[in-house]
Image (tube, rainbow, N blue to C red):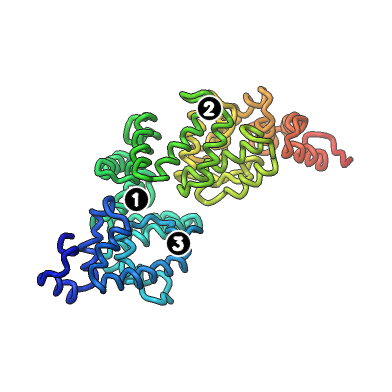
Amino acid sequence: MAASVHPSTDTVRPAIDEHNPDIFTIICCNDSFQLALDLNTIKTLLRVCKRAQYLLSSKLARFHRWCQSMELLNPDGQLRIGLTPSDEIALSLHCEDPVKTGRSWLEDQADQGNATASYLLARIIQVELDRVPDREWWATCQRIFFLLEQAAHADHLMAECHLAECYYYGQGVKRDHTKAVGMYRHLADQGHPQAQIGLGLCYEDGKGVQQDFNVAFEWYSKAANQGSDDGRLHMVFLRGWFSFIGHGVEQSDVDAFNHWQQVSTHSTNPVIKPIATHMLGWMHYLGRGTVRDEQKGVKIIRENQSNGFRLGEGVLIGYVASSNSPASRKFFNLCLLGSDREWLCRHLMALCLTCGFGTLKDQEKAAGIFEQLANEGHSDSQYRIGSFYYDQGVSKSCEKGFEWYSKSADQGHSYGQYMVGYCYFYGNGVTQDYA
């Protein structure tokens, strides 16, 4: 770097004039500087030479146009995928204009061992995982893992961090929480904010380490203190859940709602954002922490559904696809955490057990939970146990199903009302009566 700020010396001019433009990345934009230098500082360093100024004014803009064409930019123009300034500059050196071949140039660079290209390609494929058919999901995860591993071997820090994430969730490789903790800790101790968040998550979930929410908050705080909004929002999300179930703090639906609203609005995290949004739907649906608006709640829950988080309107109707995604596993564990304090957590935990959402399927246990909650007068649970007896449960009885549907309907439960009408129309569990 010292050589780059003294371009007038005889030893430097030939190097800049005669070598590949990558010299600028090597000298000024090495990833070891990524925590110390921002883009403006790098621009200042590189502008010591006209060729460097050309690289920044022309090729970097070209790369940004490519990112826009590939829909990798947020509405504010920022990249959806975390790239350091050095990453952007390094990739811009190889980006043709106009790019008529999609991302084939990026794949070519990855094949040639370009660590930054391998990392970006892996992250693009990760963003697309929601649209990958189930039969291709594991093979796609394996490709992501290979690309990240390739970049990590070349000391790409963000690739190392996401590789640890693969080990943590078992995506493309056998799950290994101990290895993930080791990788996260190695990077976190160096001050890497994303790794600090990853290590905080390990302590939050008790995976690879003993569960300790206080230590989790400490690591999230370290990331947040470096300007990581993701670290801050992880704390906000967890505080929302603690407020909802009264864990270590006074129970407050209003605080829970406000915390989850903040995460739902500002987070891009594929695990905590859909969970927070889903819970907001329930808060509107039940009128907890906000004015009751069932239709708005249903709309939020319906539109929040994705391949990564499959709890759509089926969570209210009673038909949900099984899932072992990171978001589904975290959702089940959070519901389990609050199951001894909050009826909705028990209800949602039972729903997860019904279909194998983030946990092993156990319909008999789920039915027991639903019936207990139904006897306590919760209309959503009355509807669900009605569905168990009607067509899902271990002891089918349309008559008992109709009985529970009726109790739910009498409390104004719209899905229960529909099923009461359905039973009368077809004469299931009750004498047929079109009127």
Gap in Å between the C-alphas at discs 1 and 2? 31 Å
Q: Residue at x 39, y 76 (%)?
A: 97
Task: For mark 1, give the secondary structure.
Answer: helix
Q: Quadrant of the N terminus?
A: bottom left
Q: Position of residue 96 (x, y in %)?
A: 36, 75
Q: Is residue 427 left or right of residue 214?
A: right
Circles 2 and 3, Cβ within 8 Å, touching? The answer is: no
Density class for disc 3 (Cα within 10 Å; few <14, some 14-19, many ≥20) is some
Q: Which residue is mark 2?
A: 245
Looking at the rendered structure, the number of numbered marks drawn on it comes to 3
Q: Residue at x 61, y 41 (%)?
A: 281
The reply to whether residue 402 is in sight is no
Closer to the camera in the image, 227 or 337: 227
Q: Which residue is mark 1?
A: 162
Q: Residue at x 50, y 45 (%)?
A: 273
| Quadrant of residue 290 within the rendered picture | top right
Q: Which residue is mark 3?
A: 72
Q: Position of residue 58 (x, y in %)?
A: 35, 73
Q: Is residue 128 left or right of residue 384?
A: left
| Quadrant of residue 313 within the rendered picture | top right
Considering only vertical position in the picture, is 115 above or below 381? below
